[in-house]
Amino acid sequence: MCIHGRYFVCSFFHAMKYKVSAPKDPSSDRFILSKGHAATILYAAWAEAGLFPKSELLNLRKIDSDLEGHPTPRLNFIDVATGSLGQGLSVAAGMAYVGKNIDKASYRTYCLIGDGESAEGSIWEAMHFAGHYKLDNLVVIFDVNRLGQSEPTALQHDVETYRKRADAFGFQAIVIDGHNIEEIVRAFDEAAATKGKPTAIIAKTFKGQGLDGVSDHENWHGKPLGDKAGSIVKNIEERIAGNVPATIAESPVEDAPVVSIKNIRLSSVPAYKKGETVATRVAYGTALMKLAQNNSRVIGLDGDTKNSTYSEKIKKVSTHNYIECYIAEQNLVGVAIGAACRDRTVAFCSTFAAFFTRTFDQIRMGAISQTNINCVESHAGVSIGEDGPSQMALEDLAKFRTIPGCTVFYPSDAVSCERACELAANTRGICFIRTSRPATVVIYNNEALFQVGKAKVVRENPGDKVVLIGAGITMHEGLKAADTMATNGIHVCVIDPFTIKPLDADTIRSHTLRVGGKILTVEDHYPEGGIGESVACALSTDANIIVKRLAVNEVPRSGPPEVLLEKYGISSNCIVNAVYNLLQ
Amino acid sequence: MCIHGRYFVCSFFHAMKYKVSAPKDPSSDRFILSKGHAATILYAAWAEAGLFPKSELLNLRKIDSDLEGHPTPRLNFIDVATGSLGQGLSVAAGMAYVGKNIDKASYRTYCLIGDGESAEGSIWEAMHFAGHYKLDNLVVIFDVNRLGQSEPTALQHDVETYRKRADAFGFQAIVIDGHNIEEIVRAFDEAAATKGKPTAIIAKTFKGQGLDGVSDHENWHGKPLGDKAGSIVKNIEERIAGNVPATIAESPVEDAPVVSIKNIRLSSVPAYKKGETVATRVAYGTALMKLAQNNSRVIGLDGDTKNSTYSEKIKKVSTHNYIECYIAEQNLVGVAIGAACRDRTVAFCSTFAAFFTRTFDQIRMGAISQTNINCVESHAGVSIGEDGPSQMALEDLAKFRTIPGCTVFYPSDAVSCERACELAANTRGICFIRTSRPATVVIYNNEALFQVGKAKVVRENPGDKVVLIGAGITMHEGLKAADTMATNGIHVCVIDPFTIKPLDADTIRSHTLRVGGKILTVEDHYPEGGIGESVACALSTDANIIVKRLAVNEVPRSGPPEVLLEKYGISSNCIVNAVYNLLQ
C-alpha cells in the first residue's frame, strides 16, 4: 500500500466519512481515483476496511474477478470507471456541485490525480469549474511523483508551479511532503476547515518510495517487480507495524436521503398543431422544462450555448436546475456524469452537435462507468447553413452508435422530440438526442405514442415501390419527395426510425419485403456510421434486399441550408432522382 | 474592423512579417484565428492588405464565396480551419515548435484566442506545451471581452486571473487595454524582444466597442445589427481618418526554404521471416525510424506512450525528429497539425488507440483544415487484455472512417505495417494506422507489394464456401479457424482488406460471388462502424450477398487476451462456429 501514497491512506481512513456496509450510500463521502492505474491501492484499502476478504486481492486482473486492471463500477464501491486519464476531476466536480447546490448535504468529494495526467486539459476545465463555483466540499490531491510512463513529467518535482496553477484556478493550494503522515493529516484538516474555495493538496512523492532500486527510478511504470519482488515484499512486511486493522474515522451525516428519479413524465402533453413549424431544438427546451416541473431532480447543463440549444428554458422552472459549464465540453459531460452518480439527478447536457465530438472519450468512459446521462445536441448537419463545416456535426450518429447500450434518438418533429426527452429521462444508460436547427413541420398528433426501438410508418400505400427512411431534416425532404412522386403515380413508403439505436429492423424489413426489396436512406450525416449503415447492416443477412444510401460525401461549405441540402445530395430533388434510379 | 480588436490590426499590420503575394510562404509569420467566429476581421485585414478586392467582402457566407462563416484553407491565406473553439493554440504551438527547433528559422507565430474559449482544456494543454518548450517565437493574444454567447464568461474582466494563469503556465504575461494602440504596439515589441518564454498578451476589451447600444451588452453574439446598422455604420465611417491603405511593416527573412516531403521511402525493405511473431506496433516503430532515415522531415510525436507504441525508435535517428507531447492528446494532434502546415514536416503522432478517442474533434477539424497528418494507434481492442476496457479502443475504426478523405490502414502483420507507414507518409490527408499489442505471425514475404484500397487474398481454394474477412488479431484467429475447418474439408477464402477505407469492394465482391454469396467478418471492435459495417455497406446494393458479422457486443472486462477473444465471440473457435452456422 506504500507505492501510491500515504495521502491516499490518510484520506481514506482519516478524512473520509462512509459506511463499509453501504459503500455508495448517498450521504457518504465520495472518492474518485482519477489515476485509475493505481487501482490496487484502492482495492487494498477497501479490503483493509473490511468490505471483502484480503485474499480476494490475489485475483487481481483475472477474468472471474471484478478487481480489474482499472476500476469499474462492477465493484460496488466504484462510482465511475477511470483509466483514461484526466477525467476523474470533472466527475468529482459534478458530485461536489450537486452536493453543495442540489443535495445541500454534508458529504464531501475527494479526487486523486496523477501528475502525468495533470497535463490533460480536462483537468484544467474541471479546475476552472470547481474554482468558479467555489466548491469547498471538494479536495483534489495531486500526486507529484515526477515520473510518467516513458520519461519524467514536464514539471517533474516543481511543486511550486503546481501551487501557482492551482491558486490561479481558484483553489486553496497546500504543498506537502506526500510521505509525511502528519503533513497529510494537517492538509486534510485544513481543507475541511476552508470555506469559499476548493482545496488542492500538492503532494511531493517518490514513485515506488521505499522500494530499493525502484524508488524514483524510470521504467517501472506498470511493471511487476520481477526478481526484486522477494526482497521488497520482505522489507515491506518488516515495516508494517503489527497487523492492526484500520478503522474508519467517522460515520457520515445522513442528510442526503434517497430521491426518486423513476417514472418522470412531461408535466403536460405536447401542444402543437399538425402542420405548424417548430424546430426540434425548441421542443427540447420545452420538454426539459416540463420534465423539471414534474421532478426537481431533472437538471440541465450546457456549455454557453443554452440560448441556441434552448436548454435555458429549464431556468424558468428554477435556476437551481441549471448548471452553466461554459465552453468546456469535456468537463460538461464529466460534470453530468458526476451529477448522475448515485442517482442524485437526471442530467441532460446539451451543446452544438459538433462540439460533442470532443467529449467522445468521456462518453466512451461513461459507458464503462454504467452512467445514466442524456446528451442532447442541436445544430446537426449541413442544415445549419452559413456558419460552415466547423459547426456542422456529420459524424455524431456514428460516434454515439458505437457506445454499448446507448439509445440514439433522432426525432423528426416537435411532438416526437418531447417524447424522446421523456423516454430518455426514464431510460438507463447513455441517451443521445439529435435535434436540428431549422424549424420543421409538426407531423404527429399530440397524442401519438412513441417507444424506444419502434419506428413510425409515416406514409404508406398498397402500391409502394420503395421504402424511404429519413430523420430530422431529411424526413421532411423525404415527405416532399414523396408528394412530388405521388403526383406522378409513384408511391413510396416513408418510415421514421425514431431511434437509430436500437433500430426497428422488423418494421423496416416487413415493409421492405412488401414493396419488393428496395430501401433508400437519406441523412444529414457522412455516409459512415449513420442511418444508412445502420439500416444496411440490420438487414445485411437478408438476401434480396438492396439498400441505397444518400449522405453527405465531402466536407461541406457555408451557404443557405436549402442550397446545401441540394448541393450535397440529400434534398427532395435528390431523393426523387435516387428513387427513379432505384426503380430502373 | 473595430469590433474584434485593435490588437488584431496591430499584430497584422505592425508586428507580422509576410508577403501579400505569397500568403503561405514558408518564411512568413503565421497567424491563427482560434476564435474563428471573428472571421470577418481576418478577411477584412487581407482585403485591406491588398490580397483581394474589398468588394469581395460583400460575398461573405454566400455559397459561391470562399469567405465562409468560419475560416477554412479554401482561402489561400488560411493554414487551418477554426471555429470549433480552443483548438487554434495547439496548432500555433506546433508551428512555433517547428519554427524554433526544426526549421530554426526567423518566422514567428501569432494566435488570437477568445476569452470564452479559454475555458477549453485544449488551450491549457497548449499553454503547458508552449511554456515547457520555451517557444519564444509564439505570441498569444487573449481577447478578454467579458461576454460569451449566452451570458458573461466565468472570469468576465478579471484580467489579473488571466495574467496569473498565463504566468503559471510559463508565459510572459502582459496585460493591456486592448483598445489602446500604443499599449498594443508596445506589447508586441516587448514580445519580440523576449527570449526563453512565449508571450501572452491579455487584452481587456469591450465587445462591440464603439458601437452605440451594443458595446459591452449581452445578446449581440453573432447577430446582425438590424435597425441599428445605419447609424452605426455612419458613425464608423466618420471615425475612419481618411482612406489611406494600410501597409505591411516588413518583409520576412527568407530563411525557411521549401523542403521536399515527396516520395518518402523506407530506408530498407522489411526484414522479417515468415512465421516469426512480431507485434505490428513494433513494426510501426521500425518503419518510422526507416522513414526518418530517408527524410529528415519525418517526425514522430507521442503522448508519453512512446515505449509502448514504439514511436521512441525514431529517437535513434535523431532526437530532433521526436516531439514529446506528454499526456495531452488533444494538443498532441493539434501540434501535429501545426507541424504539418505549409508542408514543413511529415508528422506521425501516436498513442494508445483508446486515447485518440478524445482527439476526435481535432481530427474532425483536421479534415476541414485539409491537414496532412498520420495517426498511429497501438493497443486496440480486447486483445490488450488485463488492463481492461478503459484501455481498449473498440470504436476507433468508426471514428476515423467518418472523416472525409481519411485513409484507414489496419495491417495484419509486420511487413504490411511497415508498408502502411510508407504509404501513409506519401498519402495526403489524414491517415490512420491501427496497430495491435500482441505479437502476431508474419504472413507476407518481405517483397510483397501493398496499395491503398487493395485487399490481399491470403488463402483461397476452388472449393471455398465462405469469404472470411478479418484484420489484425482477428486475421490470425481467422487463419487458425481456416486451418481447423480445412482439416474437416471446409474451405474458406480469407481476405485481408489492408485498408478499411477505402475498402476494396471489388475484390471482396468477386470472391464472394465465387463462393456463393456468403461473407463472415470478424473484428476486435464494437459492431458499429468497423470492418463489418464497412463490408456490409459496400455490398448493400448487391442482392444475394449475405454478410454475417462477429464483433465485441458489450463493454468487455479485464482478462488474458485469448480468454477475452473467446468470451467476446471473436476467437478462432467462434469463427468456426459462425461459418458452420452460415453453411447450414
Image: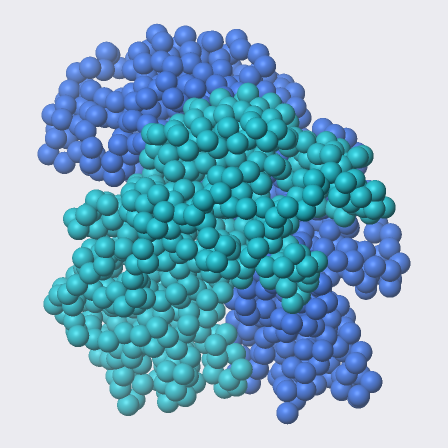
Chain colours: A cyan, B blue
User: What residue sits 47% from the left and 26% below the top?
Assistant: A173
Q: Is residue B472 left or right of residue A375?
A: right
Foreground residue among A452 and A201: A201
Q: Is residue B545 left or right of residue A231?
A: left
Note whether B6 is above or below B525 in the view shown. Answer: above
Q: Is residue A150 left or right of residue B58?
A: right
Q: Position of residue B580 (x, y in %)?
A: 68, 87
User: What residue sits 63% from the left and 59% below the top?
Assistant: A53
Note whether B134 is above or below B362 in the view shown. Answer: above
Note whether A462 is above or below B367 in the view shown. Answer: below
Q: Position of residue A334 (x, y in %)?
A: 43, 47
Q: Position of residue A69 (x, y in %)?
A: 64, 54
Residue most toward the bottom? B584
Q: Does any portion of residue B238 appear in the rendered image?
A: yes
Q: Position of residue B198 (x, y in %)?
A: 53, 19
User: What residue sits 23% from the left and 11% below the top?
Assistant: B241
Q: Quadrant of the C terminus of chain A?
A: bottom left
Foreground residue among A258 and A48: A48
Q: Quadrant of the N terminus of chain A?
A: top right
Quadrant of res A269: bottom left
Quadrant of res A549: bottom left
